[in-house]
Image: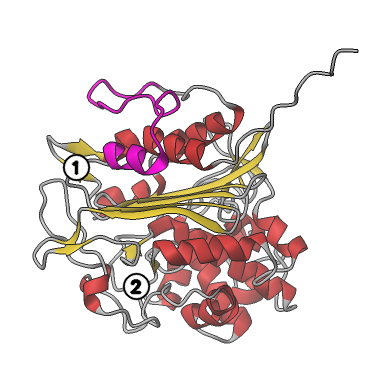
Amino acid sequence: MGTFRCSRRHFGGTAAAVLASLLVGAAPAEPRPPSDPVRDPVRDGDGLADFVRRTWPEGAGGTVLAARGGELVYCEGFGLADRAAGIRASCGTVYDVMSVTKQFTAAAILKLEVLGRLRVSDRIGRHLGPVPDDKRDITVEHLLTHTSGLVEALGDDYDPLSRDELVRGALTSRPRSAPGAEFHYSNTGYSLLAAIVEKASGQAYEPFLARHLFAPAGMTRTGYVLPRWPRQLVAVEYDRLGRSQGRPFDHPWAADGPYWNLRGNGGMLSTAGDMLRWHRALLGEEILPARARDKLFEPRVAEPDSENRYGYGWSIRETPDGRLAWHDGGNGWSLALLGRSLGDGVLVFWASNHAYRDGKWNLEERAQSLTLGIVERTKPPRTVLSGAASP
């Protein structure tokens, strides 16, 4: 598992380029691998449902959702969520959404700022106690934008690490760069943000999110342990050989959720329906007032080798049609992507519990065609202005 840790957003550059290209009407930025038999989604005349059905790899479990504004356009499950029990994937299947979790953590920080409990300009020592000299200038915003210089990870996702051990390990780790100097994607930084949520609020991380984010958005099936889903609703994950890796909570977890190498940066469980409710909440002010909400989507720090800039828990791309916000996640078994076109309110969410199968499919290779085709078929039709009438 540790080998794939950085893969929690490993196909992000491709996905962002694809989503940006669809907004400007361009062709995909990179050609598909020759092994991918999917036709060009922009040129095909089929509808959204037919397109997704023929593009999704046969045998891969997962769910796909698309919405325009706050309205559901499409949702369908594919394959099996649990092969041993013969349970099919559906729009109600619960998936590990992996690094999509980061946007919840970022929103929790902004909620605390609205409540007057912190400022994103605060140095982390204000909330975490004494900080070594080489990390004294790290701010909350540095953690939000992956510019803290902290290590990417302290160990395996499922190492039994407590909050205090996470904080101590992060603060004594060797810096990768000076605070604010460079972008270095850091899951450790987002776990520190979860610790700051707890320190500033006086509540545990998940209960704070449940009260201040999920409940106002109507999200009853998102969390680590609080939703208490029936076990059969949670997808089993499968590796490249088709072997079961169990459900997320079958791995070592604390009583209140994953240990702190994963908490706050990944591991959140959710459904396609709750991702739509999250999207709707971000269209309004159910969870954050407009000024605070817009901070999430402000492009702040350039991502290396990319036209993207990182905001607070979102990658952002400026396009002629407005900003594109997205985040993905992967753990070597599963993949998920959530993308939002901020100008026209289009949402795409898909997740798979078996993204790779040696010799058969690799969903990462199809991410470009899949995402582009879905959004292209979900966007509102462009208005074509007619010429002036003849005299």
- For this rendering, which residue is in front, 255 or 11? 11
Magenta residues, start to end: 31-55
Residue 58's disc is 1
Residue on which disc 2 sits: 258
**Could you say where residue 201 lies in the image, as x and y percent from the top left?**
61, 82
Q: What quarter of the picture does the C terminus occupy?
A: top right
Occupied quadrant, residue 380? top right
Question: At label 2, which amino acid type do we have?
Answer: Pro
Q: Taking 297 as reference, is 389 left or right? A: right
Question: At label 1, which amino acid type do we have?
Answer: Glu
**Could you say where residue 255 lies in the image, as x and y percent from the top left?**
32, 84
Residue at 26% across, 20% down: 34
Q: Specify the farthest residue to the front.
A: 391
Q: Are marks 1 and 2 in contact (CB under 8 Å)?
A: no
Is residue 110 shown to the viewer in this render?
yes
Q: In the rendered image of this protein, does residue 268 appear above or below residue 239?
A: below
Mark positioned earlier in the residue sequence (1 or 2): 1
Q: In the rendered image of this protein, does residue 150 appear above or below residue 140?
A: above
Front tag of 1 and 2: 1
Q: Is residue 50 magenta?
A: yes
Label 1: element kind = loop
